[in-house]
Image (spheres, helix red, strand yellow):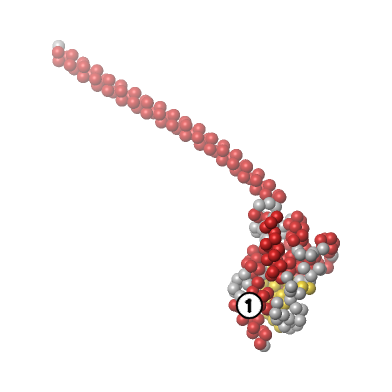
Amino acid sequence: MAGSRDDDLEDDEGDLTRKQRREQARAQRKELEQAEAAGALRRARLTRLGIVVAVVVAVVVVILIATGGGSKGGLKKGKEQAPVIAEVTGLVGGIPQSGKLLGDPAAPVTLEYFGDLECPICREFTLGALPSLLQQWVRSGKLRIEYRALETATHEPEVFKTQQIAALSAGKQDKMWYYIELFYHEQGEEDSGYVTESYLQQLAEQVPGLNLTQWTADRSEPALASEVTSDTEAANSAGFSSTPSFQLGRTGGTLHTFEPGTYTEIAPYNAAIEKLLKS
């Protein structure tokens, strides 16, 4: 009998152990289910939050593009304008200007410069090699530079024409180079649509001594639009398809394609100009 009771106790202990294991397993499953449910809830919340954030960001981007604001707009504001105007004045101030020509009209060497005002590589040239060219050769009366338009970076033909006419209109007051250099110095982000009427007007307001009433009236002259077309035809005849592109030669003679290989280093420009002056 004692043996039978011992066996029953062992069976009870075994049953109890199995019961405990089942309860533990059930508790673990419940914990897993709760964890999974909580995780799903968190993911759902994060998804909803992500959608809200994306919508907010999209709205902000649309507002910035519509207003031309932010860093994409390029234009300096308030106190930031003065240093830029001073830099451009130091660059071209005191150099004779006539329409799109910068420098002494009788200078022995001519550099024809085809550019797009929205072209970031033209901006590299403005900030890189151009200052040395102006200081060493243009101010000394040995080189003159003629700016001509070629659409490359501006993707809307009407915008290209409008911005170039705005520059040519400043040229009617012999201030075109102020306008184009301010444009390059305050150039916005490419393809951001920053060139608006407000942008063009504010650039004009920064040009030292520009008569804004006359500038506005001159923009409607058909001759300026024809000049943009003429520049494009000249670029096509020269085989140019990128900006900046250059032609260089003796003034009054035939100009030839000049490929400096750099827009920041002055050495190739110096060598080519010196060779022409010696010829």
Residue at 71% in and 63% down: 85
- Residue with the most extreme left position: 2
The C terminus is located in which quarter?
bottom right
- Alpha-carbon neighbours of circle 1 within 10 Å: few (<14), some, or many (≥20)? many
Side of 146 where 23 appears, left or right = left
Query: Is residue 254 visible to the viewer in this orientation of the structure?
Result: no
Side of 135 where 3 appears, left or right = left
**Coordinates of residue 83 in the picture (x, y in percent):** 67, 62
**Coordinates of residue 99 in the picture (x, y in percent):** 79, 71
Side of 8 where 39 appears, left or right = right
Q: Secondary structure at mark 1?
A: helix
Query: Is residue 105 visible to the viewer in this orientation of the structure?
Result: yes
Residue at 69% in and 56% down: 79
Closest to the observer, 257 or 267:
267
According to the image, label 1 marks what residue? 269
Q: Is residue 255 above or below residue 35?
A: below
**Coordinates of residue 168 in the picture (x, y in percent):** 78, 67
**Coordinates of residue 159 in the picture (x, y in percent):** 74, 59
Q: Amino acid at mark 1?
A: Tyr
The N terminus is located in which quarter?
top left
Residue at 63% in and 77% down: 269
